[in-house]
Structure formats: structure tokens, C-alpha cells
Amino acid sequence: MPELPEVETVRAYLETAAAGKRIERVDLLLPRLVKNAGPEPFCRALEGQQITGVKRRGKYLLLQCSGAVSLLVHLRMTGALIYQAEESVIQGTRAVFTLDEGRLIYRDIRTLGCLWLVPSEGPAGVKGYDSLGPDANSPACTEAYMIEKFSSSRRTIKAVLLDQTVMAGLGNIYVDEALFSAGIAPQRRCSSISAGEVKRLHQAIRDVLAQGLQHGGTTIRDFIGGNGKEGSNQAFLRVYGKEGTPCPQCGSLIVYVKSGGRGTRYCPHCQQ
DNA sequence: ACTATCCTGAGT
DNA sequence: ACTCAGGATAGT
């Protein structure tokens, strides 16, 4: 579920709510979510540590800890990290981090999320994390970089934008929105994208991510931020989930197709 | 470059 | 009963 703006919304809240607090106890209700440690070593390694900061890279969250290991989290489709000052029951709770003040709940309905212990001096050893490209909204993701990546691939532009090793943070919603904003059809081969189109796409990616962040993320179904509240960016989407409704630019109907196994929405008139 | 798969839940 | 879902990866 969560893409860059959603994960950043969680990060920003947890940075203020949980950083500086100490993990007193870890209860792991679903051990298989931890990918690189057994349940007991996982809990014992984190207990007693202070959370010194909360970072984000792509769609990964890092709870930096004072000890040798820190906690890396990927929320995948339905994960959520929620800080509670007062205890209340949350459906789908898979792990509970009791802090010296309040607690952190890891909730995950579909249980596809991942937790890892990583060295505090720098997360390493997690394949997907190690191979991340530059964050899609970072200065490192330049037009020149995009041109270079696109020219050497015969894949579709949609598949390449979803590829986290090319650039990190985009998911299905923001890719469809960015392609609409840039006027590029999702099934285009990325080697056919012109420099002018890359320029529009580069700006469009920045715009849709900034807008998502500004609205506290997009909540279609499950997403909630670190404070347990939903985002509001769903009210500003122009194609995602809009199949069968008029295009906001030209009035022709938004189309739904499958592209690389992912549901894809676009305007066949505005996007060429 | 596709597809099958990991899961649960909601909608048709 | 069947399809779909904001993600990623191990297969083919």
C-alpha cells in the first residue's frame, strides 16, 4: 500500500512521537515477519535500546537505535507503524514495541510486510534495500539519469518506474498519476520516450509525490499514518481508481488495463 | 519480460 | 465462488 509519500508521512510523525524513547519490551505476535533473525534474538536485540531517529529510504523505514542493531521495516501492502500514547486495541496487530512512554504497534492485515535487524552504523545485507536506486524525489534523480536508464531498456515506462532499483519510492498509484500528468501512455517502451517527455515526467513525478506528502498520503483502503489517521490525497487523484469516469482534462473515459500484472489507469486521449 | 506467489479481506 | 488490492521476488 504505502509508497514514498505514505512512508514519509509515517516517518515524520514517528520522528516526533517516538524518537528519544526507549524500547522496554518487544512482543512479536507473528514471527515470520522477521526475515533475518529468530523471534527471540530479534526481541532481545531491541529491548533496552533507545530510538535515536526515524529515517526513510524509498519505501523502507529505519528506526535507528542506540545499540549495535537497528530496525528496518517495509510495510509492503498493508503494513502500518502506529504510535499510541494510550493503549487501544488495533485489528491486525502483529508486533508491539512497548516504550518507556507509549508504544509502537506494527499492524499488517495481509501480513506481507518485512522486519529486519540491521547494523546501526548503516543498513546492509537486505537485498532490496541495498539495490535501491535514488529516491524518486531526490536531487540525485536527474533528467540525465532518467534518460540514461530509459535508453538502455526495452521495458514499458510503467514497469521501469515501478522498478525500485531504477528509482525508489514510486508505486502503482503515483506512477499512474505521474504518467497522466506527463501525458505519456503507460505501455510505451521507455526507450521511445523523448528528452522533452522525460523533462515533463521528471517534473510530474516530483509534483505528484509532493502533493501526496502535502495531503498526508493516499488512503484507498488501509493506509494510516503514524498517528493512526488516514491520508487525504485520494481526493486529488486524477486517474488512479477513476476508470469509467471522465478524464479531468478532455472528458473522454479513463481506461483500465493490466500492464505487467498491475492494474493501470490512463486516458487514451491525453496520454500518447 | 512475464507469472506465480506470499496473505487477508472486501466487493461483485 | 471468484476477482481484486497501494509490493517485491523467485521462478520461468
Image (cartoon, coloured by chain):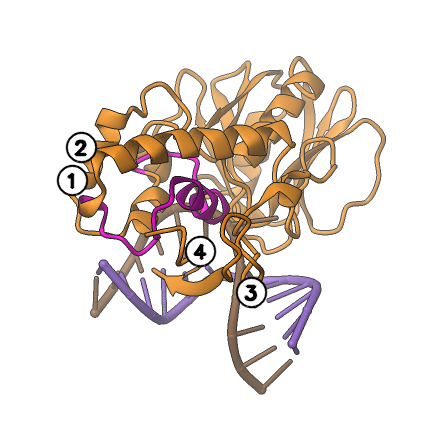
Chain colours: A orange, B purple, C brown
Front in this rendered view, residue A26 or A207 = A207
Distance (Cα) linking label 2 and label 1: 5 Å
- Mark 1 = which residue? A151
- Mark 2 = which residue? A148
Distance (Cα) linking label 3 and label 2: 36 Å
Distance (Cα) linking label 1 and label 3: 33 Å
* Mark 4 nearby-residue class (10 Å; few <14, some 14–19, many ≥20): many
* Mark 2 nearby-residue class (10 Å; few <14, some 14–19, many ≥20): few
Q: Earlier in the sequence, mark 3 or mark 2?
A: 2
Q: Nearer the viewer, mark 4 or mark 1?
A: 4
Q: Position of residue A201 (x, y in %)?
A: 35, 36
* Mark 1 nearby-residue class (10 Å; few <14, some 14–19, many ≥20): some
Q: Is residue A155 left or right of residue A136?
A: left
* Res. A44 visible in picture: no
Which chain hosts label 4? A
Amino acid identity at mark 4:
Cys
Which chain hosts label 1? A
Which chain hosts label 2? A
Distance (Cα) linking label 4 and label 1: 25 Å
- Mark 3 = which residue? A244
Q: Are marks 2 and 4 on the same chain?
A: yes
Q: Are marks 4 and 3 on the same chain?
A: yes
